[in-house]
Image (cartoon, rainbow, N blue to C red):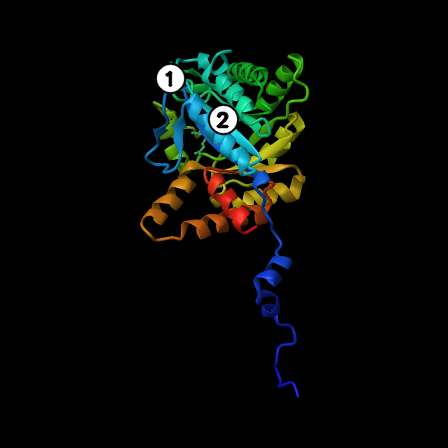
Amino acid sequence: MTPVGFPAVRPRRLRRTPQLRRLVRESRLTPAQLVLPCFVKEGLTRPEAIPSMPGVVRHSLKSLAAEARQAQRLGIGSILLFGLPRRKDARGSQADAAEGIVQQAVRAVKAAASALTVITDVCLCEYTDHGHCGILRGTHVQNDATLARLAAIAVSQARAGADVVAPSAMMDGQVRAVRRALDAAGFTETPILAYAAKYCSAFYGPFRDAAASAPQRGDRQGYQMDPANVEEALREVALDIEEGADLVMVKPALAYLDVLRAVKERFHWPTAVYQVSGEYAMLKAAAARGWLDEDRATRELVTAMRRAGADLIITYAARRVAQQLHAAP
Ligand code: PBG
């Protein structure tokens, strides 16, 4: 006789063995869905450590090529390149120089690891002496003057061999401007990954150390999004899709998983999420003190991003995650 109140349905039945758990697992991740962001700095002969991002370096062209080969071996889908020029100026001239550092880096990665998809960041903040993502008048970033620069940068990156370009300046109309310029230059097949919902976040701190791209004066609240807003993110994504975004992005990840979920449910568009420098730094700092199990915590976070709807995950931990996925898919 079954005692009164005895549960007929026992969810624990499906949790009993690793085999059963794997059979009913809802979210899966493969290395092919990972994107590894890399910094490459002009004039380096050996890589430079970035103190606030343990395990991440500013690459030389040579060490970048080695990193790309390793990423390819691990089955990582893509690499996202950030160039750090020797000379910065008000208009970020080096960003679209034919022999600029990121253009050279694209060619080096393509030569070293032809199966990797190379994505390039289309922005000015790594290239301007004032550190803003566009052309300044006084302290104001001018939208339309910046669009022309972003378009030129995207074309020069495509010309160098970039497979996908990723405008990240948060200027209005940047996707349309980049699409038109690419088409006019004959790059009609080059997809655009739009940083559609990019929030004004404290979690970009270590990146700005890495790229020496912190604004000299002011901040980015005039163009990046207010963390309080989710409907605005949906409007941003709608606009970017209308303008020609092939993929859209939500950034950062951890504090914005609700936004990611809303974007995916509303648009059903290929959607990337960016686990940014500060999220990575937090994890590394706690792990270094023995306060968190780094592998488990990292895996849990990327799983949450998948569960929330990400098709692509951009993370500085891509190598570690790929290694884990090979060991325990
Ligand atoms: C460029 C850009 C930023 C990041 C990626 N592209 C930074 C910013 O707005 O300062 C941040 C990435 C990270 O923190 O890992 N506009």
Q: Residue at x 58, y 69 (%)?
A: 12
Find residue 322 and report its horizontal and vertical position in percent: 52, 43
Q: Which residue is mark 1?
A: 43
Q: Nearer the viewer, residue 113 or 36?
A: 113
**Could you tell me the amino acid type at mark 2?**
Leu
Find residue 48 and report its horizontal and vertical position in percent: 35, 28
Q: Quadrant of the N terminus?
A: bottom right
Q: Is residue 283 above or below residue 164?
A: below
Please give left or right for residue 303 compared with residue 282 in the image.
right
Q: CB at mark 1 closer than 8 A to ligand 1? A: no
Using the image, tell me which numbered label, if any, was put on residue 238: none
Query: Reading the chain from its start, which is encountered first: label 2 or label 1?
Result: 1
Q: Is residue 193 above or below residue 184?
A: below
Query: What is the crowding at mark 1: few (fewer than 14 residues within 10 Å), some, or many (at least 20)?
Result: few
Q: What element does badge 2 sit on?
A: strand
Q: Are marks 2 and 1 in contact (CB under 8 Å)?
A: no
Q: Is residue 19 above or below residue 160?
A: below
Q: What element does badge 1 sit on?
A: loop
Residue 231: tell me if it is visible: no
Find residue 129 and report its horizontal and vertical position in percent: 37, 17
Residue 59: tell me if it is visible: yes
Find residue 100 and report its horizontal and vertical position in percent: 47, 14
* Count of numbered labels shown in the rendering: 2
Q: Which residue is mark 2?
A: 81
Query: What is the crowding at mark 2: few (fewer than 14 residues within 10 Å), some, or many (at least 20)?
Result: many
**Could you tell me the amino acid type at mark 1?**
Gly
Q: Quadrant of residue 250?
A: top right
What's the CA distance linking mark 2 and mark 1? 16 Å
